[in-house]
Amino acid sequence: MLANKLINALTPSAHQASVPQAVPRELKKGEVLVDIAQMIEATFLVGNGVLRVARQTKTGLETTGYIQANEWLTSGFDGQPVLSEIHVTAACPALVFVVPYEIGQQALASSPGAALTGLELCLERHERQYNQIYMASGRVAPRRALALALANLAHFRAGKPALVERVISQDMLADYINVSRTVVNRLLGEFREQGLLTRTEMGMELSPELLSLAQTGDPAALAQSHAFGAAA
């Protein structure tokens, strides 16, 4: 029914007790899943599609990240529902499985491995959110900001290039790094021309050089520094 890292980490007994109680919910683009100040009383597992996470600022809602398939959203590990500080909507048509909060907590409590996986996924998402705030701050050149965004949104596959799924649109990327769609379109074209990015039926495959750009800056400068080190 549901392919999800958290679900796959459950013990067989916890899986049997919790997964059948997951209620599928189909979301239309723009539909609200969680609103600010709403009590979060369930664990949300993303089956497919993309959810947009935003925070309230003085000027309105500001995107802080996206949640994709294989990821999840809950209030935490303290055993108590909490008031949401985020606004979560469907960035595109999405399927979310809603697990009653108590059921989700019981499943994690009986599956230490799943609890650890859940914590790792949460930490990864928070790290991406801090990266996004940095990317959208205006202190990062759009070229590197887009590379960072692509790296943040990519799925890393053993023996294959990192993949950004086709459901991630140029509008999402523009919103993610706070630039215009025109800028995103131009930069993606440059990345393709330079061999940093390849479009496939599944989405966009990222080269190691593009990931280097995300981590350290211009890959050409990185290559030059490596050459200088070898010569020295």
Image: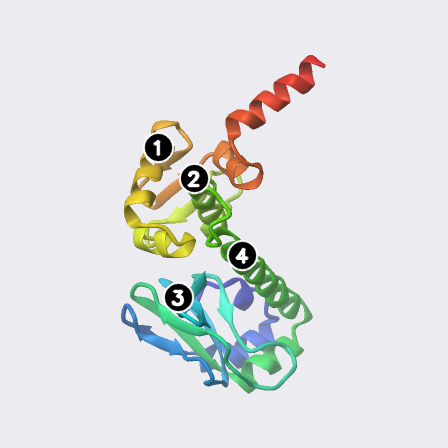
Instruction: Determine contact: label 2, label 4, CB under 8 Å.
Output: no
Q: Mark 3 or mark 2, which has the lower sequence index?
A: 3
Instruction: Determine contact: label 3, label 4, CB under 8 Å.
Output: no
Provide residue 54's location: percent of width, then percent of height.
Answer: 43, 68
Residue projecting furthest to the front: 58
Residue highlighted by disc 1: 190
Cα separation, mark 2 vs mark 4, equals: 18 Å
Q: Mark 1 or mark 4, which has the lower sequence index?
A: 4
Which disc, if any, is residue 51?
Answer: 3
Image quarter hosting the N terminus: bottom left
| Helix, strand or loop status at disc 3 | strand
Instruction: Determine contact: label 1, label 2, CB under 8 Å.
Output: yes
Q: Residue at x 33, y 54 (%)?
A: 167
Q: Single out the mark in the foreground, 3 or 4.
A: 4
Label 1: few (<14), some or many (≥20) within 10 Å?
Answer: some
Q: Mark 1 or mark 2, which has the lower sequence index?
A: 2
Position of residue 206 relative to residue 219, above or below, is below
Provide residue 169's location: percent of width, then percent of height.
Answer: 31, 52
Residue highlighted by disc 2: 143
Cα separation, mark 3 vs mark 1, equals: 28 Å
Q: Residue at x 65, y 81 (%)?
A: 78
Q: Single out the mark in the foreground, 3 or 2.
A: 2
